[in-house]
Image: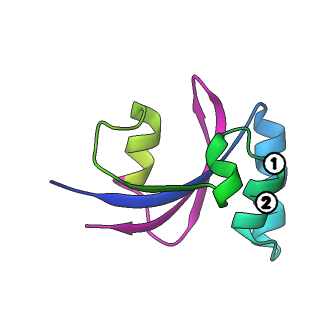
Amino acid sequence: MAKATASHILVKTEEECSNIKKQIEEGSDFAQMAKEHSQCPSGKQGGDLGEFSPGQMVKEFDEVVFSDEVGKVHGPVKTQFGYHLIFITSRT
């Protein structure tokens, strides 16, 4: 069974999500941005979601984590919770 580890930042609007992504691309620390902006409780841990398998997260989230490039920030990804930036740290 595939497994992945990832961190994310959850915000309400696509615009806010895009602005945060731009700041990260310009050198801001992902974990620090998660602590400052994420509306998910994981934000307190820098957005760290730990290890999970397909089906444990919502479909849109799973599609990114289990198919897109590891080590990059992906998003904005829209789910029923809002807009996510997803940083895939590993996948097996």
Nearer to me, 51 or 24: 51
Residue 74 x, y percent position in the rendering: 58, 56
Crowdedness near tag 2: few (<14), some (14–19) or many (≥20) residues, C-alpha within 10 Å: some
As for residue 78 lying within the magenta part, the answer is: yes
Residue that mark 2 sits on = 33
Left or right side of 45 for 88: left
Q: Which residue does the numbered mark 1 point to in the structure image?
A: 37
Answer with left or right where residue 78 lies relative to residue 22.
left
Q: Residue drawn at (76%, 45%), measured in percent from left and top?
A: 17
Residue, far bottom: 27
Q: Locate the C terminus by quadrant.
A: bottom left
| Magenta span: chief secondary structure | strand
- Asked if the residue at tag 1 contacts the one at tag 2, i.e. Cβ–Cβ closer than 8 Å, the answer is yes
- Label 2 amino acid? Met
Amino acid on which the number 1 mark rests in the picture:
His
Marks 2 and 1, how far apart in space? Answer: 6 Å
Numbered range of the magenta stretch? 66-92
